[in-house]
Image (tube, helix red, strand yellow):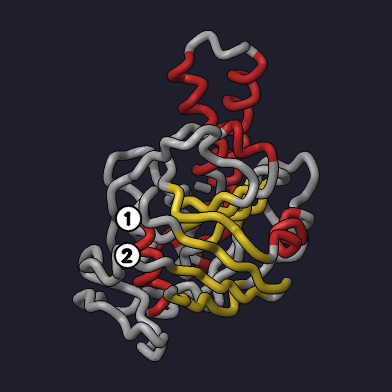
Amino acid sequence: MADDETDADKPKSSRAGCARSALLALGVLLIVVYIFTQAAGGDDESDEEEARHNAVTTMPRVTTTLAGRPAEVEPECPEEDGSSPQTLMFTEAPPVCIDEDATYVAVVETSRGDFEITLDQGSAPLGVNSFVFLARYHFYDGVSFHRVLEDLLAQAGDPFDPGLGDTGAGYRIAQEPPTAQPPYPKGTVALANEAEPESTGSEFFVVTGEGGDLLPATYSVIGEVTSGINVIDAINATAVPNDDIGVASDPTVIESITIDEE
């Protein structure tokens, strides 16, 4: 929200030693705050919610794909057949590139198998539009699930080293908080954010278990896994038990995301 949802900056490889140690220490500190708040029984509801958010969203990043960022380009709607060249940085949020009357299904091919996400425009039209836009520009190709927390979430969606600056595709959009209850059951796909009104970025997470009940209803729900939940279970199985950092024992890589329009 796992960036964002979720995103602590990770240092460039040239300064990985000291900076990574500092980030790990920060992550451990945030986890301790989270556990203490839970044990205290939530005397201060707002503090508890903030601790929950921090425990999920500000842990150190552990995997990256690209060390540098290309030049930003003006956003234009990609080809619907997926033939647009891979594009990774944009000057601003995309225009509306989806049909409000259509249903979109994202076919996510990973190194551990394939799963499908039926997208929900009614819940988060801005989020769905952004996700479809980025997927059709092959933004997510080759990106790993960099954070896997057991029975809670598997998060992916940023091909860059956050230590280079702003994370994601170069733009942010507004949160679209869910209204359904519970907001994040297993199989829910939501966008990560940084707990600010306009801080939703490119990262997304899949809820992998009952731990989704711990999350505050601040993350835009863009859909649900409607096929291949066994793949989500397999990704969840790579989480290290009782590890709150989220380093997967065997990272899962997104090979491609194809958008089908119905």
Q: Nearer the viewer, mark 2 or mark 1?
A: 2
Q: Are marks 2 and 1 in contact (CB under 8 Å)?
A: no
Instruction: Name the residue rendered at 59%, 31% in the picture.
Output: 214
Q: Position of residue 37 (x, y in %)?
A: 59, 19
> Would you say residue 3 is visible in this rendering?
no
Q: Residue at horizontal 67%, vertical 49%? A: 208
Q: At x 44% / y 68%, what residue is drawn?
A: 104
The image quadrant of residue 135 is: bottom left
| N-terminal label among 2 and 1 | 2
Visible residue check, residue 64: yes
Residue under label 2, please give it. Answer: 101
- Amino acid of disc 2: Asp
Q: Measured from the top left, where is residue 118 in percent x and y?
A: 51, 62
- Residue that badge 1 annotates: 125
- In this picture, residue 3 sits left or right of residue 114: left
Q: Specify whether 133 is left or right of 112.
A: left
Q: Quadrant of residue 88?
A: bottom left
Crowding at mark 1 (Cα within 10 Å: few <14, some 14-19, many 20+): some
* Direction from residue 99 to residue 159 in the image, left or right: right
Q: Is residue 217 above or below residue 123?
A: above
Residue at image position (65%, 74%) is 110
Secondary structure found at label 2: loop
Circle 1: element type: helix
Image spot of residue 79 (x, y percent): 33, 85
Residue placed furthest toward the top: 43
Circle 2: is it few (<14), some (14-19), or many (20+) Cα within 10 Å? few
Quadrant for the C terminus in the image: bottom left
Q: Residue 32, labelled with which disc? A: none
In the rendered view, tell whether residue 66 sits above or below residue 96.
below
Quarter assignment of residue 205: bottom right
Q: Amino acid at mark 1?
A: Pro
